[in-house]
Amino acid sequence: MIESIWYDSTVSAVARGGVMSRFLPALLLFVAIFVGCGKPEGRPNRDKLLLAVIPKATSHEYWKSVHAGVVHGRDEAEVDVVWKGPLTEGDRETQINLVQDFIAQGVDGICLAPLDSQALAPVVREARQSGIPVLIFDSGLDDETNIVSFVATDNYRAGQIAGRHLAELLMEKGRVIILRQAPGSQSAEQREQGCIDVLTEEFPGIEIVSSSEYAGDTADKALVKSQQLLQTFGDEFDGVFAASQHVSMGMLRALEEQGLAGNVKFVGIDSGPQLLDALRAGKMHAIVLQDPVGMGKAAVTTLASHLRGSQVPARVSTGETLATRQNMERPEIRQLLEPELYE
């Protein structure tokens, strides 16, 4: 969490009980009145706008870079921020509960990276009805009628870039495995579809032998699924596309176990220390990069501008870049490959 905000102590006390238990009835009455009033008119002790930022997860390297961008955005926009999200990218219920908690606490605005493009839509609508604007970042909602803006990579284009480069590496022929991330994640689904569409529509010499398997929400789960795929196909495939960082991690480990790393053409999305090493060693052949630091910063500054009365764009694109062993030392590429060095 970036900041300790004044309302946290109240919520924590209710949850703990203990010495507060004798005051619980009165405290709950206070909370009920507070929530029933919707977004509070007066906020004593709040000198700045208060934004809640809810990522898909907090443990992945990618989201740590987004967090760094959120800190930059907080400082530039001169707002207070609470950063809180699920541990891994599989806990939709926690995300839903967090949005509802922040609505009850009366934050000024919410930046949300939804784990599910449908499941989070009702609470976003609830936030809007409570007078709390919501900006969506990283991954979208199917229903965008209740949001201020969408800050993200063009994920379909990222998938297209990956697919075209994989086809080029394969000299436009061969057998390809596409390992998906998880159902419901719009960003991953768009990447996967972009890659599939490019390979099937533009490269008739390439056969997609698997595109229906999901890796799950951690690198360990992705490893298990990758091992299963390699057991099924042996060495009878030529290329792999992995839809996100932890999916790439799991596939990389499986390829290394089977002695296939470097021989199978491997393209992923999002970097991390081990994937960077793999790219440098020729075990990965390309990584399509987002700008997580820029995304986190843009999410906070865009929502702050909206809250201060400025017109903001409905869509803010943060870009997508192909990194290869040949271009990875260029300053502009290295900054995206190793954002922690530039935070």
Image (spheres, grey):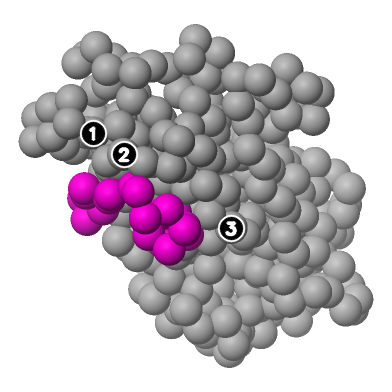
Amino acid on which the number 2 mark rests in the picture: Gly
Q: Was residue 291 drawn as part of the magenta stretch in this picture? A: no
**What secondary structure is marked by label 3?**
helix
As drawn, 43 above or below 287: below
Extent of the magenta region: 193-213
Residue under the point 24% across and 12% down: 259
Q: Which residue is mark 1?
A: 237
* N-term mark: 1 or 3: 3
Most foreground residue, 320 or 294: 320
As drawn, the label of residue 157 is 3
Residue under the point 73% across and 29% down: 333
Q: Which residue is mark 2?
A: 174
As drawn, the label of residue 49 is none
Asked whether the beta carbons under mark 1 and mark 2 sit within 8 Å of each other, the answer is yes
Q: CA distance from mark 1 to mark 2?
A: 7 Å
Amino acid on which the number 1 mark rests in the picture: Phe
Q: Mark 3: give few (<14), some (14-19) or many (20+) Cα within 10 Å.
A: some
Most foreground residue, 89 or 221: 221
Quadrant of the drawing holding the N terminus: top right
Q: Mark 2: give few (<14), some (14-19) or many (20+) Cα within 10 Å.
A: some
x%, y% of residue 66? 63, 42
Image position of 339 (left or right of 140): right
